[in-house]
Amino acid sequence: MKSYRTSISTHKDGKPYVYGYDLTKLALSPSFTRTIYLILQGKLPDKNSERMLDAILTISIDHGIAPSSVVSARNVYSGGSPVQAAVAAGILAFGEFHGGAVEKAMENFKTYIMQKPNIVVSEFKKRGERLSGFGHRVYSADPRTLALIEIAKSLGFFGKYVKFAKALEKELSLSAKMLPLNIDGIIAALLLEMEFNPKVGKGIFIIARTPGIVAHVVEEAIREKPVRRLTDEEIDYDGPRPRGDK
């Protein structure tokens, strides 16, 4: 019995294939997004699906130096680790509150799509659970979300999942502080509109954000001196005062 099985890729007659498509021929296409869609969905996208996924990847490529993924990557490189270790550290920093909510939001939207938004919000509140895909520390309205919604409307992806996510956003604003539909939430809804499996959710965000992390690591290498370290002025110590000798 063979150790692994896959339907994704193979080699035949000296050429690499993904889902039966010759990569040497796909390379003639100007679109990397098209091949990303293929390897995650098992089929080539139509033009609107390709454009929608491209918009998701483009708008998610970076969000400044502040996110934990970038801080982690730059700090690890600053400590003397190689580029691949620093980029991996940045990816490992993705979690429930930073990029990792896409999969959970997709699962929630699929599970509760047939329920009324007020009932869904009420159920989560009773359980003391946070609805993934909503809320942002910087934005009261996430401009990336707004942009993707407009693109979705123009491409025919403003469907039941996006509408459900918007209805949840409206309901949340009535019962708590403003919790806008964030980048994780809108990506989750749009991936469902394109019939992606929820397990793809985190992967899409990783694919989108990795070039940005690489750029930050390279910038750290070129512009900064090792080793990054907080100064005493940047640390607020609130532990015990120095103790006298016993």
Image (cartoon, rainbow, N blue to C red):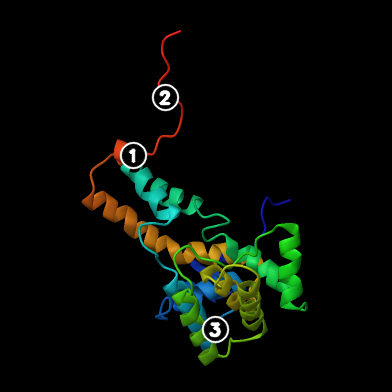
Counting from the top left corner in percent of width and height, residue 60 is at 45, 69
- Relative to 198, 231 lies left or right: left
Q: Which residue is mark 1?
A: 79
Q: Nearer the viewer, residue 9 or 59?
A: 59
User: Are the residues flagged by discs 3 and 1 in contact, CB closer than 8 Å?
Assistant: no
Instruction: Choose the circle earlier in sequence order: 1 or 2.
Output: 1
For the question of whether residue 231 can be seen, the reply is no
Q: Which residue is mark 3?
A: 49
Q: Amino acid at mark 2?
A: Arg
**Distance from the alpha carbon under mark 3 to that under mark 1:** 42 Å
- Mark in front: 1 vs 2: 2
Badge 3 marks a residue whose secondary structure is: helix
Counting from the top left corner in percent of width and height, residue 150 is at 49, 87
- Please tell me which residue is depicted at 33% across the width and 56% down the height of the picture: 216
Instruction: Choose the circle earlier in sequence order: 3 or 1.
Output: 3
Q: Which residue is mark 2?
A: 241
User: Are the residues flagged by discs 3 and 2 in contact, CB closer than 8 Å?
Assistant: no
Q: Residues within 10 Å of mark 2 (few under 14, many from 20)?
A: few
Q: Residues within 10 Å of mark 3 (few under 14, many from 20)?
A: many
Counting from the top left corner in percent of width and height, residue 173 is at 60, 74
**Distance from the alpha carbon under mark 3 to that under mark 2:** 60 Å
- Please tell me which residue is depicted at 26% across the width and 41% down the height of the picture: 226
Badge 1 marks a residue whose secondary structure is: loop
**Distance from the alpha carbon under mark 1 to that under mark 2:** 30 Å
Badge 2 marks a residue whose secondary structure is: loop
For the question of whether residue 107 can be seen, the reply is yes
- Relative to 35, 191 lies left or right: right
User: Are the residues flagged by discs 1 and 2 in contact, CB closer than 8 Å?
Assistant: no
Tell me how many marks there are: 3
